[in-house]
Image: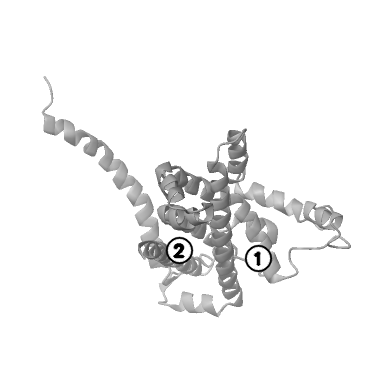
Amino acid sequence: MSRPASQGRLLPYILISPLVVFIGALSFYPTVLSTVQAFFRVTPLDPPTRFNGLENFRDLFASSAVRTSIANTAAYVVIGVVFSVVLGTAIASALQQHFRFRGVVLALVVLPWALPGVVEAVIWNWMYDPNFGVVNSVLRSLHLIGSYQVFLGLSRWLTVALIELSQIWQITPLMALIILAALQSVPRDFYEAAHVDGANRRQSFRYLTLPLIRPALAVSSVEALVLSLNIFDQVYVLNGNATLGSSLMLQTYIVTFQDLNFGQGYALSLVATVATALLSMTVIALLYRRSQA
């Protein structure tokens, strides 16, 4: 006996609904718990837990280490978003052309994104090594430096820039893939029409390509923003626990799992979550507003 048609249509929803509820609970419950606990004093070594309002946030923002990590993270975000999206666009434009061994080049471009962040940080730590690093070797062979230099740990902003460079190397391939997919969706007829109207390659890219790939640029910018704001592996491997190049995520780890101040750890993670949401919405709003202008 065959099932009624309405029952057959409802069957996928019946099967999927428990999975959706389960996945939603895995995301919703920890978020609510962390948000609530951010307003409590939670220290396992000094119980009990008690409500303390905004005291966790006041203590955090009074800490010079936390303020430094926030400023550093802002620099990570600006450098990461600008350079990864610009380089990703340039790489995607180059890969859009058909040439010999294009598949091999594409695989090599994707490789840094496929590697774990810790592995990449270890590679860059070797490259920055003051005794036998590749960076020192290249700079000395070009006669730009007279002797091997220590790059990490001496200057705050140089340390931040070099750490973010290692992350840009990792995340740029993802930006290139997103933008490449958008470039390949642009009809060739548009370029032919622009050429007939007298537009050169630069004008076509500026007035035709960029407006048409705005959604991809928005997605890649938000992705770069989130990855840069949550940078941890590269900072931990290249900078350790030093305040000089500390990031917001590293400081959250230190407060929570080294100082065992879970309440302040929850508060700092809430700050990072809110900042991520607000900045992401701002980037999307700006890009789409410019697209419509």
Quarter-of-image position of residue 247: bottom right
Q: Quadrant where the N terminus lies?
A: top left
Q: Is residue 77 left or right of residue 277?
A: right
Please report the residue visible at 44 percent of the width from the left and 48 percent of the height from the top: 196
Colouring style: one colour
Q: Earlier in the sequence, mark 1 or mark 2?
A: 1
Amino acid carrying mark 1 in the image: Val
Q: Residue at label 2?
A: 276
Name the mark on residue 160.
1
Mark 1: few/some/many CA within 10 Å (<14, 14-19, 20+): many
Residue 255 in view of the camera: no
- Where is residue 161 shown, x and y percent of the image? 66, 64
Residue 237: image x %, image y %? 67, 56
State the residue at coordinates (49%, 45%).
180
Q: Disc 2 residue type?
A: Thr
Q: Is residue 19 positioned above or below 7 on the image?
A: below
- The C terminus appears in which quarter of the rendering? bottom left
User: Does residue 179 appear left or right of residue 2 in this picture?
Assistant: right
Query: Which residue shows up at 44% across the image and 66% down it?
Result: 279
Dots 1, 2 in contact, CB < 8 A: no
